[in-house]
Image (spheres, rainbow, N blue to C red):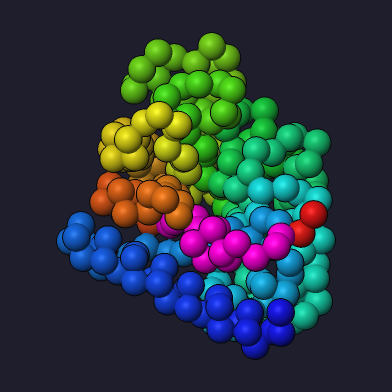
Amino acid sequence: MPDQARRDQLAASLAEVHQRIARACTAAGRDPGSVALVAVTKTYPAEDVVLLAGLGVTDVGENKDQEAAAKAAAVAGAGVPVRWHFVGQLQRNKARSVVRYADVVESVDSVRLASALDAAAGRHRDTPLDVLIQVSIDGDPARGGAVDPAAGPPPSDPEHDLRRVAETVAAAGTLRLRGLMAVAPRGWEPARAFEALAATAARLRAGHPDATVLSAGMSGDLEEAVRYGATHVRIGTSLLGMRNPLR
């Protein structure tokens, strides 16, 4: 597909996503400017990121380090500035790689991972790394996420206690606690999930007033997320479409 045709396709999808965000904000009595778009480009080429940046997209999400590192290098080589969000589950042994290109890590869910990122950022960054704590809304450890003990049973592993993770990030010299991220659990109504997340976010802000970011909502449920206070929505399919992805 020629670049111009792909650009036109992305421009149309982007306009539609922005319209959805604006309508959701209007319904919730919020300023549309209060919700930022993170374009999730996993499995799509660096060329799409360059095109999206030319259309005004500033924040890009990736979920696998190997793909993200190469893509970030290619986009930087093209002279295109974007803000990279790492949104996937992250192993501690990938911390040294991720801190080199990511501006935000949205998937910190344990004290161990926070400590690993702090150590890696201290060696490989000149600026603080923004961090969101990934919350497990239903407490299922299989899907990852820190657990808010005020919302239900405490985590089986205290390393995943939301309060401990938040304290570790806040005390780290190279990390900056910015807020929370979550995905609505399968089988839950999105409104129920994001209402619970909003309550957890309010509890976090009580102890960490600067942790104001709430990354929630994807292509299928962004409206419910905006209703319950999302400041960032992570959009992939509705923006990139069904183009043949990278393999």
Q: Is residue 142 above or below residue 55?
A: above
Going by the image, does 107 lie left or right of 50?
left
Going by the image, does 28 lie left or right of 180?
left
Going by the image, does 47 lie left or right of 128?
right
Q: Does the magenta segment cover residue 242?
A: yes
Residue pushed farthest bottom?
4
Q: Is residue 181 above or below residue 154?
A: below
The front one of 232 and 149 is 232
Q: Give the quarter of the figure containing the N terminus.
A: bottom right
Tell me where residue 81 sits by quadrant. bottom right
Residue 48 showing in the rendered view: yes
Residue at x 72% of width, y 47% of height? 64
For the record, the magenta segment spans 232-245
| Residue 203, horizontal then vertical, whole percent | 32, 34
Q: Give the quarter of the figure containing the C terminus.
A: bottom right
| Residue 47, horizontal then vertical, whole percent | 72, 75
Q: Is residue 115 above or below residue 14?
A: above
Residue at x 41% of width, y 68% of height? 17
Q: Does the magenta segment cover residue 10?
A: no
